[in-house]
Amino acid sequence: MAELHIALEVNGEQREADVEPRTLLVSMLREDLELTGTHVGCDTSQCGACTVLVDGHAVKSCTMLAVQAEHTAVTTIEGLGQPGSLHPLQQAFWDKHGLQCGFCTPGMIMAAADLMAHNPEPTDTEIRHAIAGNICRCTGYHNIVAAVREAASVMREGAAAPATNA
Amino acid sequence: MIPAAFDYTRATSVEEALGILASDEGAKLIAGGQSLLPLMKLRLAQPARLVDIGRLPELRGVSKLDDGRLSVGALTTYAELMDSPAVHLAVIRDVVPAIADVQVRNRGTIGGAVAHADPAADLPAALLALDAELVIQSSSGTRSVKADGFFQGPFATGLAHDEILAAVILPAPRGDAGSAYASIQQRASGYPIAGVAAVVFVGAGGLVEGAGIGVTGVSDHPYRAHEVEDALVGTTGTADAVAAAAALVVGDREVSADIHAGREYRAAMAVVHARRAIEAALARAR
Ligand SMILES: Cc1cc2nc3c(=O)[nH]c(=O)nc-3n(C[C@H](O)[C@H](O)[C@H](O)COP(=O)(O)OP(=O)(O)OC[C@H]3O[C@@H](n4cnc5c(N)ncnc54)[C@H](O)[C@@H]3O)c2cc1C
Ligand code: FES
Ligand code: FES
């Protein structure tokens, strides 16, 4: 099958790739763009490990074609923060033991990032609903909820007082 | 899992999409892909060509018609529906959060949900109860049909291969109306084992003057339970009247059975959730 040449923004950079129409967004991210932070857990739209943001909205990248993402802005876990300058969500997952094996973590964090964008002060119930599409086999979710709650509070403080370069 | 190879066209107009459908038997529409792509990955669906209607502005957005009704474009996602004036309908507020998860609600469209016609899809129950209208386009013109009668069997609707569902028309909110959705979910998938949407119109003295009852998950397609509506209208919605009406929700329909619920249990749950939906709708109307 003929490949299509597509352009999109990934983590703030213009990227291009040649993909077959049937190429899933997650395959393009992992295999063509070598962004392996996005995981494939179930490959059947159930587990949310592959969650990325497309134009700011959390989606399961195993259930979207790469061609459907043409000219969109995609954010993966690599686009949130870097070692040394972690995003508040990444820092809070570390501090609150929001992960054990870490397999679900990128997807959990991207789902939480979608929540934060439109609900800066989520209740625990709202956090649990926001991650209902993400399965974790290790933590029992308790510390994940605690981590998201913590990150929300850090981000609210950050928004109130401009962050110093920590 | 990788879908079988296909040709891909991103339609730039409804006319272009309709033209491809009319001339190519192997062409299939894709909107959000939340039902189609999982099937294609399992190779249960292997369309030769996908026509992507996902970016057609004509099919997007929610607008108010002159008569107060809402025209909801087929490409409206569940998430967008919750941010639209459609949330003034309580049954919409109830049903959308019951569907799937945030990620699926960000991509899944109402047109895709209706056209796909899963026998356990949640939204059709609400559309049936609301007496919604479906606007359907083909190269030969536009037609409107009632949701009632559109769902015909498992994944089977009144939509022809060369037609596109363009919009869903929802009724204008009314002061005397109350509505609700109640369902029992299969925990892992979130799909309802039985789901019932109820709309009631309550007049002076608490008299039920009209009702709409939509049922999903129970038989091989979502249906409107006219028997329940008829039993409810003319009563004052007492607990006994509601229970008697809810008891008619299955009637002589063939009830589905699967590993999650046998026939008897599913039928019993349909009655329970019919009663809950009607009671919640009445409470909101009063
Ligand atoms: C993990 C998961 C959980 C889910 N849980 C639930 C749940 O709990 N309850 C529930 O009700 N649903 C559930 N769903 C299904 C979801 O609601 C539907 O997949 C979604 O709404 C379909 O819309 P779409 O735009 O993604 O359709 P697509 O997948 O793009 O299309 C589906 C079908 O409709 C056709 N089609 C699409 N748009 C049109 C149109 N405008 N005109 C004509 N034909 C069209 C396509 O050709 C295709 O055959 C779940 C899905 C997933 C992946
Ligand atoms: S890998 Fe995409 S949902 Fe599990
Ligand atoms: S930390 Fe192991 S799956 Fe969540």
Image (cartoon, coloured by chain):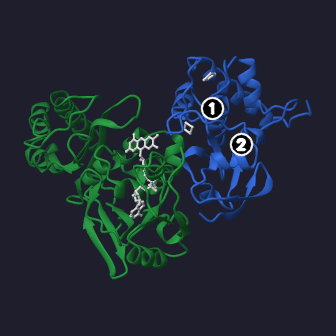
Tell me the element at label 2. loop
Q: CA distance from mark 2 to mark 1?
A: 12 Å
A59 or B27: which is nearer to us?
B27
Could you confirm whether marks 2 and 1 are on the same chain?
Answer: yes
Q: Is mark 1 within 8 Å of ligand 3?
A: yes
Q: Which residue is mark 1?
A: A108
- Residue A48 at x, y percent in the picture: 57, 36
- Left/right placement of residue B233 relative to residue B189 reads left
Residue A17 occupies which quadrant of the picture? bottom right
Q: Report the chain holding disc 1.
A: A
Q: As displayed, is residue B257 above or below residue B17?
A: above
Q: Circle 1: is it few (<14), some (14-19), or many (20+) Cα within 10 Å?
A: many
Residue drawn at the location 43% of the way across and 79% of the way down: B19
Identify the residue shown where x is 11% and y is 48%: B233
Q: Earlier in the sequence, mark 2 or mark 1?
A: 2
Q: With respect to residue B227, does B58 lie above or below? A: below
Quadrant the C terminus of chain B occupies: top left
